Image: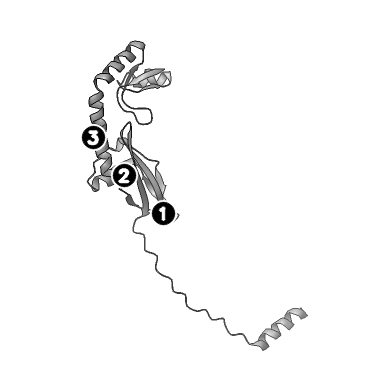
Amino acid sequence: MEVILKEDIIGLGYKNDIVNVKNGYGRNYLIPTGKAVIASASAKKVLAENLKQQAHKLAAQKAAAEEKAAKLEGVALTIAAKVSATGQLYGSVNAGTVAEELAKLGIEVDRKIITMRDAKTIGDFEATVHYHKEVEVKVPVKVVAENQPAPAPVEEAPVEAPAVEEEDFEEEIEDATEA
């Protein structure tokens, strides 16, 4: 079933896109909630006319999105999380956590426009912020252990072998061969 989206739906498409969806998803969710309309021939003509009239407005929206994206260039997040002894996180680091960390830096981003695979271990991950159909920013996210002790330099003391007297050693060998 072809539908015309009336709003951005992450994972499906952006506003005014014509997309193919399963019949049940379109009929039971998208159309009743007002997120899409059936892409009939007349609806496609109306969409084309509206896009033609709104070209200037769409260019302004894209420019605004590029301006917001410029603020995120070069931003790298380090998120501290509680970690078990095996390196697994208690909970996970997800799009909501990334949005909170960006807010701490003074960059307001809605968590709904961020996509990220849930981080359940420590390591490096990548979050994508979708400002516009053509403007996406990838933000590197490093998950580290909270209150992780810094590895102390290990000083190795010279290990001395215990002194073994040759006489005792020879007696042990003789006893072992006699038995």
Tell me, yes or no, whether the two marked residues, 3 and 2, touch with CB atoms within 8 Å: no
Q: Is residue 63 above or below residue 21?
A: below
> Which of the 4 image quadrants contains residue 12?
top left
**Quarter of the image where the N terminus is located:** top left
Q: How is the image coloured?
A: one colour
Q: Earlier in the sequence, mark 1 or mark 3?
A: 3
Dot 2: few (<14), some (14–19), or many (≥20) neighbours within 10 Å?
many
Nearer-N-terminus badge (3/2): 3
Of residues 166 and 46, the one drawn nearer to the viewer in this rendering:
46
Q: In terms of secondary structure, where does tag 2 sit?
A: helix
Of badges 2 and 1, nearer the viewer stands 2
> What is the spatial separation of the Cα atoms under label 1 and label 3, in whole angstroms?
42 Å
Q: Nearer the viewer, mark 1 or mark 3?
A: 3
Q: Quadrant of the C terminus?
A: bottom right
| Residue in view at x 25 percent, y 34 percent | 63
Among the two numbered marks 2 and 1 on one chain, the one whose residue lies closer to the N terminus: 1
The residue lying at 35 percent from left, 48 percent from top is 141
Disc 1 residue type (three-letter):
Ser
Q: Is residue 117 left or right of residue 96?
A: right
The numbered dot on residue 84 is 1
Residue at the spot of label 3: 64
Q: Which percent across, then down, holds residue 39? A: 36, 15
Q: Can you identify the residue that label 2 sits on?
A: 98
How far across and down, in percent of the image, does residue 167 sit? Answer: 67, 88
In this rendering, the answer to whether 1 lies above or below 95 is: above
Q: Horizontally, is 62 left or right of 153 in the view?
A: left
At label 2, which amino acid type do we have?
Val
